[in-house]
Image: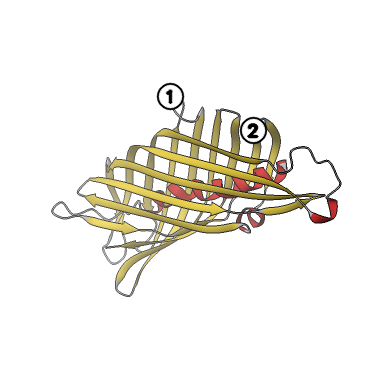
Amino acid sequence: MCRRVVTAVAATMLWWACAGAARAQDASTDLPPEDRWTFVVAPYLWAISLDGDAEVKGVETDVDVPFSDAVKDLSFGGMLLVDARRGRFGIAANGVFTRVSPDEEVGPIEIDATSDLAQLGVGPYYRAIAWQYGETAAGQPLRLIVEPWVGARLNHLRLELELNRQGRFQDVDLGRVGQHFDDSETWVDPIVGTRFALNLTERWIVAGEADVGGVLAGSDLSWNVQGYLGYRTSVLGQPTTFAIGYRALYVDYDHNEFKWDVTQHGPILGALLRF
């Protein structure tokens, strides 16, 4: 049961971790217009693995969940990053909702689990550095961009467990079988970080981000590092950047018999559409 509970939480945390992944992809080196708003929409996928320790309702276990186990029980997942920018200022909002419904038979016990996650992160940023360090052969500027940002991430995690007796074991005394467990946690992490982008050529770009959160509220500590290689093109006439990279996110949250001390890491593949 312990393994199944942690796998359910791990699968939910997969999509929670994705909530900030597209922000670094949006560190465009184009100079933003001063007289109008520009918008970005970015879908993405994080092939995540998890390593660490967890505790649910007083039951402790090691967390070692590969990507294949984390996604196979996903019932529904929806996520959307929207970035609005005018001049050097901008704001990004990222909403996520997922439902994971793993079921497992452990001897005479059938375990039905459902975990829901609702998450909303919002953060303003400022283009502090836009340094042109060279030009392409066609005369296009090559720039280094640095954008500090601050924000907050609201997280709500609900885990429901139901333990049922299987028919062929009706005469076995199984203690807690038939009981129903329903627990939830809600917390807010303040976040401070920066992102950068660097033109390699007219088409190719490298980008990255680092941030730290929690400490003063929410998680005891969280940190995130990520880097990308992007290719700039257009799709149906819209400026589009395809990106591939790697991300690691560490979260240490401990409250009300719910503990999550886990590093989540893996490759990311995404696309950024600009309007």
Give the residue furthest to the front: 171
The amino acid type, in three-letter code, at marker 1 is Leu
**Residue linked to disc 2:** 57
SS at mark 1 in the image: loop
User: Where residue 216 appears, x then y in whole percent?
Assistant: 43, 24
Give the residue furthest to the bottom: 236
The amino acid type, in three-letter code, at marker 2 is Lys
Instruction: Give the answer, above or below, for where 2 lies relative to 275.
Output: above
Give the residue furthest to the right: 171
SS at mark 2 in the image: loop
User: Where residue 225 appears, x then y in whole percent?
Assistant: 49, 42
Along the line of sight, the residue nearer the viewer: 98 or 211:
98
User: Where residue 241 appears, x then y in whole percent?
Assistant: 38, 63
- Side (left or right) of 133 relative to 162: left
- Side (left or right) of 170 relative to 112: right
Instruction: Give the answer, above or below, for where 28 lies relative to 162.
Output: below
**Residue linked to disc 1:** 216
